[in-house]
Image (cartoon, rainbow, N blue to C red):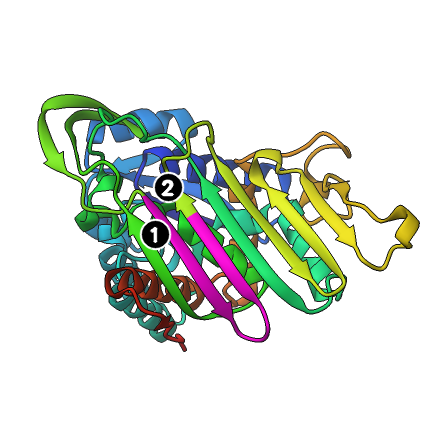
Amino acid sequence: MRTVNVALIGYKFMGRAHSNGLRQAAAFFDLPYRPALKVLCGRDRAATQQVAERFGWEEVATDWQEVVNRRDIDVVDIVTPGDSHRDIAVAAAKAGKHVICEKPLANTLVEAKEMWAAVKKAGVVNLCNFNYRRVPAVRLAKRLISEGALGTIRHYRGTYLQDWIVDPNFALVWRLRKEAAGSGALGDIGAHSIDLARYLVGEVTDLTALTKTFIKERPLPTATTGLTATAGREMGKVTVDDAALILARFEGEAIGTFEATRFALGRLNYNRFEINGSRGSIAFNFERMNELEFFSGDDPKDRQGWRVIQATEGAHDFVSAWWPPGHGLGYEHAFAHAFVDFLRGMAAGKSPDPDFREGAQVNAVLDATLRSAESGQWVKVEHIQ
């Protein structure tokens, strides 16, 4: 088994998720390559070193440009804030590295298209990591739709609710600054709903939207840890949305709604969708991630009703590599599944879904949403080729 050397750029929340995913993928799945945790890169050497020692990275570095140009690096994995995605990904592609990038692909549609052009020109395997695609219950939803169990799709309702910034004294972390994050709840969590809709239903063609910022100033942070920070006394301006609502049309007959907010008090990570078709319906809630709800209109009238399918059998995607039926999976497993598909894609010379083109297509929907929210008009979504 050949070893591929991975460089991870970024070490905080997503850095830990990716570090664990790499380790788990190699431990539980039969893979064509063995991923070696070669270099962990972060601006704070001491903090990066702590994470490296915890997860088993061989080296640490503080200069990403030096890392991506190293001859011994095969894969560059990007988990930094969105303002650096384009520069790192383009440089990595030019250096001939295979590239993984966290969602959203970029802070702007222009940058996302540049990233797609770079990996396409270089011919390197690439993945935009929308991790919820690789939850077994979501894969089952995809299978049911593909097999026609829902018939003609008519409705998609995507709802992603959190409450972690509802306190007005919560510090102004980078996710609340447009220059670093691109957008707020829209790009942070709404992008997941958009990607799931594209994966399960199809392309969004046009939309109308509104966004809202409830708290316009927050204390500047003095120190950050994961998603949280210590608030100082000085105040700064919030430059992204706190919530976003979208009304959309898809190719074909389907229509959809999307809601993303970080102000739904009591909701921690409520990522839910419901899809209604001419023959049946499905519903999924990540807070019950091992379950898929299914209603079949083909059942006899005297026994119709929603059934709950436990997507924990060996027949469900990825599950056979883990635990016996019924034992369940967690948030971290979807990251391992992404690396499984990526490494298999490297062996086949083919990028797994969603690649950078698909990541850029999500950016096209985000871009249309922001333009619609500003103009108050229906806006067409650009199609990325």
The quadrant holding residue 114 is bottom left
Along the line of sight, the residue nearer the viewer: 372 or 178: 372
Where does label 1 land, which residue?
Answer: 72
In reply to whether residue 370 is colored magenta, the answer given is no
Q: Secondary structure at mark 2?
A: strand
- Kindly identify the amino acid type of the residue bearing the numbered disc 2: Lys
Point 37% across, 37% down: residue? 262
Along the line of sight, the residue nearer the viewer: 208 or 380: 208
Q: Is residue 260 left or right of residue 232?
A: right
Where does label 2 land, which residue?
Answer: 38
Task: From the top left corner, tell me how far across and down residue 364 is, in percent.
Answer: 36, 67
The reply to whether the C-beta atoms of the residues labelled 1 and 2 are less than 8 Å apart is yes
- Kindly identify the amino acid type of the residue bearing the numbered disc 1: Asp
**Mark 1–mark 2 distance (CA, rounded to whole Å):** 9 Å
Task: From the top left corner, tell me how far across and down residue 355 is, in percent.
Answer: 45, 63
Point 27% across, 54% down: residue? 85
Task: From the top left corner, tell me how far across and down residue 353 is, in percent.
Answer: 52, 61
Q: Which stretch did the figure color magenta? A: 243-259
Nearer the camera: disc 1 or disc 2: 2
Q: Is residue 308 left or right of residue 48?
A: right
Q: Main secondary structure of the magenta part?
A: strand
Task: From the top left corner, tell me how far across and down residue 110 is, in percent.
Answer: 25, 68
Q: Is residue 33 left or right of residue 36?
A: right
Along the line of sight, the residue nearer the viewer: 219 or 103: 219
Q: Residues within 10 Å of mark 1 (few under 14, many from 20)?
A: few
127 to 39, vertically: above or below: below
Q: Is residue 167 left or right of residue 315?
A: left
